[in-house]
Amino acid sequence: MRRGFVLVGVLPLVAFGQKAARSEPADGRTQIRGEKGERLALGGRVLDPDGAPMYPFVVSALPESFERLPCESAPRAGSDDLQSDARADRDGAFVLRDLPPGRYTLVGAFLGARPSPLGSERFDAGTRDACVEARVHRVSLRVLDHQGNTRDVTTWAHRAGRVGDPVLVCRRHGLFAENPALADLALPRFELGDETVVPVEPGDELDLAFVAPEIPLVERRLRVPSSPWLVRVELRLPPPVAPAHLSLHLRLRAGDFGDPVELSLLTASGLDVTGAARFDGPVLGVPVAPGTYRLRVRPMDFLSCWQGDPDELVPEFAPFETEVELASGRQTSIDVALRRNARLRLALELPRRGDPDAIARAFEDERDYREPLFSALGGARVELEPAPHGTVLRPEFSVEVPEQRALPALRLPGVAPGRACTSITAIPPGAYRVRVALDDGRTLERVVALAEGATTLVTLAP
């Protein structure tokens, strides 16, 4: 987030390059007088509706003359419309400095979020006892060892390959249904000493897990109540034990293993205790918290979104999954024989949709072009349901759009009627029920066998 300049501590004696004199008037206002006029401070506390202090929370001042916009288009903290900003401390106390004289509305948000008004009251620059309310639900997390002492942890959504570090993993449950791994990224968190503060909404479910090699796996699911606004949670750990040891050997059925892979150990609630670690193989040995996991090995996702032969964009081998029981003090060895990936080409015999202008407009002012383009092309959602059981896949496809020559291969979450659509998601070989959901509510289905290392063409029509 781009932030404005914040003055902390003692105010300088020079303001905007001019000589200035500092004084403390009888009304208690801090003033800086110079050729450009006085500069004042505005301070106070920010609390939630229960009176609990908000932290870490960024408070900014919005001049009275500024006509507030709707929340969705309100300025972000640090923008030119906001005069100064300050981060509240553990008591919710804040001080905004270097304000021109005038009246201000206070706005605030957690770091990176869009500010919203903190009540309707306006405060004069120079006020020191402003008290404002922030209606933000949040959870405060602490980890205690078996003796009740605070345990230092690292809260990490994706741990970037640091297998074995003590870590408290938290994830908002129920979001990003098509890709649960993204839920980790969607959960902002702020580490404050031995606490981790997480902004939430009532009804949210948080998956919590503590992971360290010498501690048996600890998991907990928390449903956020509507009251209080600050929920304090303690995760208590069992006594230490000898770590479990996992030994992996990766190989391809035909050819040598060489490309890096993504290694995950998933708990019963679906939390990845490794944070999708990069593994360069072919042999890995690592200490792990004792427990039962689902081991997943899949290719690293370095697919190009813009160009190239779709067949060349697909990872070479398919994901591998298995259940594994890791016992304290024991080594578990797993030989993983990776299979070549299967490829799927889908042809929907439906009228082509999306003229060049509509496709071009889908890219305007959009950071992620995929959803607008998907709508412009009249895209259809695809599911691959393994037979007889297994995890349902929702693959992405490379869609050829001849009308846009500069964009020969576009990566989309589904397929487009009347266009060449090739899967670029790694698909294990096997039998699947292909289910295509059209935007008019109809569903097309067909059972197909996808062979290892081969491309299968499937044509579907109403």
Image: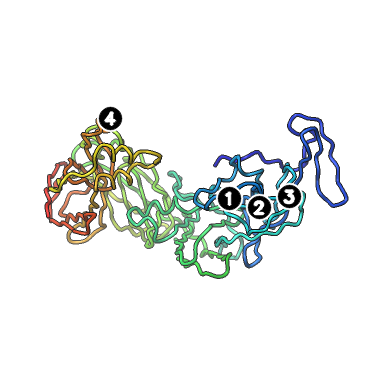
Residue with the mark numbered 1: 68
* Mark 4 surroundings: few (<14), some (14-19) or many (≥20) residues within 10 A: few
Residue with the mark numbered 2: 105
**Residue at x 60%, y 65% (from the top left corner):** 148
Of pointers 3 and 4, the one earlier in the residue sequence: 3
Q: Position of residue 275 (x, y in %)?
A: 42, 49
Q: Amino acid at mark 3?
A: Leu
In the rendered image, which quarter is residue 268 located in?
bottom left
Left of 168 or right of it: where is 340? Answer: left
Of pointers 4 and 1, the one earlier in the residue sequence: 1
Cα gap from disc 4 to disc 1, whole angstroms: 41 Å
- For the residue pair 379 and 74, the one nearer the viewer reads as 74
In the rendered image, which quarter is residue 412 located in?
top left
* SS assignment at label 1: loop
- For the residue pair 31 and 279, the one nearer the viewer reads as 31
Q: In the rendered structure, are the residues bearing label 1 and label 2 in contact, judged by CB atoms less than 8 Å apart?
A: yes
Q: In the rendered structure, are the residues bearing label 1 and label 3 in contact, judged by CB atoms less than 8 Å apart?
A: no
Name the front one of labels 4 and 1: 1
In the rendered image, which quarter is residue 365 located in?
top left
Cα gap from disc 2 to disc 3, whole angstroms: 11 Å
Name the front one of labels 2 and 3: 2
Q: Amino acid at mark 2?
A: Thr
Q: In the rendered structure, are the residues bearing label 4 and label 2 in contact, judged by CB atoms less than 8 Å apart?
A: no
Name the front one of labels 4 and 2: 2
Q: Amino acid at mark 4?
A: Ala
Against 17, residue 383 (above or below) is below
Residue with the mark numbered 4: 406
Cα gap from disc 4 to disc 2, whole angstroms: 48 Å
Residue with the mark numbered 3: 42
Left of 129 or right of it: where is 342? Answer: left
